[in-house]
Image: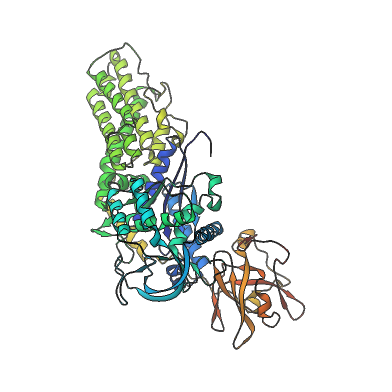
Amino acid sequence: MPANKPKFYLTTPIYYTNGLPHIGHTYSTIVCDTIRRYKRMRGFDVIMTTGTDEHGVNVERSAKKAGVSETEFVAKMAAEWKALWDELGIQGDEFIRTTDLKHAHTVQWLFKLCRENGFVYPGHYTGQYCIYDNAYVDVKAGENCPDCGRPTETITEPNYFFKLSVFQKPLLDWYAKHPDFIQPESRRNEVLSFVEGGLRDLSITRTTVRWGIPVPGEEPHIFYVWFDALTAYLSAVGGPNYEKQGFWPADIHLVGKEIIRFHAVYWPAFLMAAGLPLPKQIWAHGWLLMDSAKMSKSVGNVVRPRPIVHVLGMDALRYYLLRETVFGQDGNFSYDALVQRYNSDLANGLGNLASRTLTMIEKYSDGKIPDPQFGDNFLDAGDKAGQGIRQMAELMTSNTPGAGLAVWSMENLQFSRALESIWTLISAVDAYLTTNKPWALAEDDTNRGRLSRVLYNAAEALRFVAVLAHPVLPESTTKLWKQLGQQTALGDWQMDALHWGHLKPGTSLGKSQALFPRIEKAEAIERMEAMENEAQKQPSPVATPAPASTPVAGGAAAAAAPAAAEKIGIEDFAKVEMRVGQIKTAERIVGADKLLKLTVDIGTEIRQICAGIAQFYEPEKLIGRKVAVVVNLAPRKLRGVESNGMIIAASVGPEGRPVLAGFSDEDVEIGARLK
């Protein structure tokens, strides 16, 4: 991190991968991206983290339903999330996946610190578990989850517990000392009420769930989803080496209000127990409602962002979400309001002002920025109005308190007010042009000075709009910036350096293009709704693959190949994911003379794998051995036992005796990727 830049670290939620993103997820991520762009234009060295939460029973079940392994399922789902953010111009610096090896190490390290400090103990738990919220809930058997209303399951299992109960006073003291830690105030009051009511110790491991990060030396325990997922914020910026990277603690965790408790109670308690710095602020925004209900795939009222982007463009979606909803409060989504905002604010507002200003400069000033000092100085009503435009534009850049100021509002995450103030400037410039009638001034050469001054003021005001609105409208403001003949990268422009008069006279305009072509409302709504309906009919992107070929030796892959083996490209080989695994248990399968059932630690989880090596290896001699494992092979059943992966072996001699590929003399980390 450059020494001359202050750091700023912000995060989106780590999104769960049992479904595809809808507009609610999009809202969270666009807000974070807007803050990131704004902070960079204020001179900060910024890192924004987003990512996917890929463990837990929901993923297990979703993968099984899709007919693929968990590894393949989460890889494809994570790719879908990343692709959408790319389409929306979201510039996340870190995309953390909870299946990443560096994340697994951070979770295990955090657990070790909490355990060594006396805040973790073993026990057993029986209770109702909501698989949809990944949380035990305080209801009786047979009752639905009080949060989501869906059925719960009775679970009894050995767990490790975190002593959350002892952190009631430390948390309340922290909240009192840092009154801005939880925002907005309504969410702060909600958390205070929850903590003041008493805290119960929290189960942080599972033994009934297979898909997760193993607790070292405590198999079959895997980490509970919240101890796992929350730690992603730390693993993204160095994990155990966070001090070297210098970005932790986070400046803002941005979350939806439904998960505020986990972030404002559990997460700071984990960090306190480990002796680590706490984040500076947790901001919980409201929901985007559809027909007065929270968007949910199970309810069937989700809206996806892609149809909107395809019809109106990504900036239209970004503008609508940040302009229509007061940040921190619930908002209501409707296609009608979306297209109305597009036509009134973007097409008739910014788009029309840019078009008429640049067209007149092209026509009356040979396509070059006019000189505002051309001709004799004068002072009349038009010039006074121009001075008013200048004062209004310069006021926008002030960071002193005042809800009508663009920079101050953006600094305080009041996005709707920031945009409202920018559009006040747009309206003022539009009225300024209408009053001064440049098209009429151009008819008389004696008005050349005034014409130049009017057109320059309008163009300079547009330059201010491009800079101030860029965090929200990155695509269209970049186009406007280039049309004004500016050569520097707009995203690198510092708002503190935005001063009136820096638009250089004589600068040639760039290629003209419409920023926001006006669109027929009924037609646009019909197209978006049709695309949404079609998208809901589409199958999951995680398709069931064709049946895999039968593995040699019943699950151990032999290295021998036919004499005339077909050549493959490097891209084919790259599809095979192999990792270093360590055999934890090995046993024979009744009725299967050639098969052994193994459990193998691959770094991020414990896998059950069947291998056809029983005639050549004693089970007890395999325990602790490091082997090469194909981890992205579709699971299959061998003699009724599921095998999720493949042990690599060479085929030796005429009988094809399998010899395990391993790392007996090398200090190789479990989970390391083979290349």
Q: Is residue 175 above or below residue 388?
A: below
Residue 631 horizontal/vertical position (percent): 58, 67
Q: Is residue 161 among what the camera can see?
A: yes
Residue 463 horizontal/vertical position (percent): 37, 30
* Residue at image location 73% in from the left, 64% down from the top: 665
Quarter holding residue 151: bottom left
Quarter holding residue 204: bottom left
The furthest residue to the right: 653
* Residue at image location 39% in from the left, 66% down from the top: 134
Q: The C terminus appears in which quarter of the rendering?
A: bottom right
Residue 192 horizontal/vertical position (percent): 30, 54
Say whether residue 293 is left or right of residue 629.
Answer: left
Q: Is residue 255 above or below residue 356?
A: below
Near-viewer residue (481 or 112): 112
The chosen color scheme is rainbow
Near-viewer residue (234 or 482): 234
Near-viewer residue (3 or 332): 3
The furthest residue to the top: 376
Say whether residue 270 is left or right of residue 322.
Answer: right
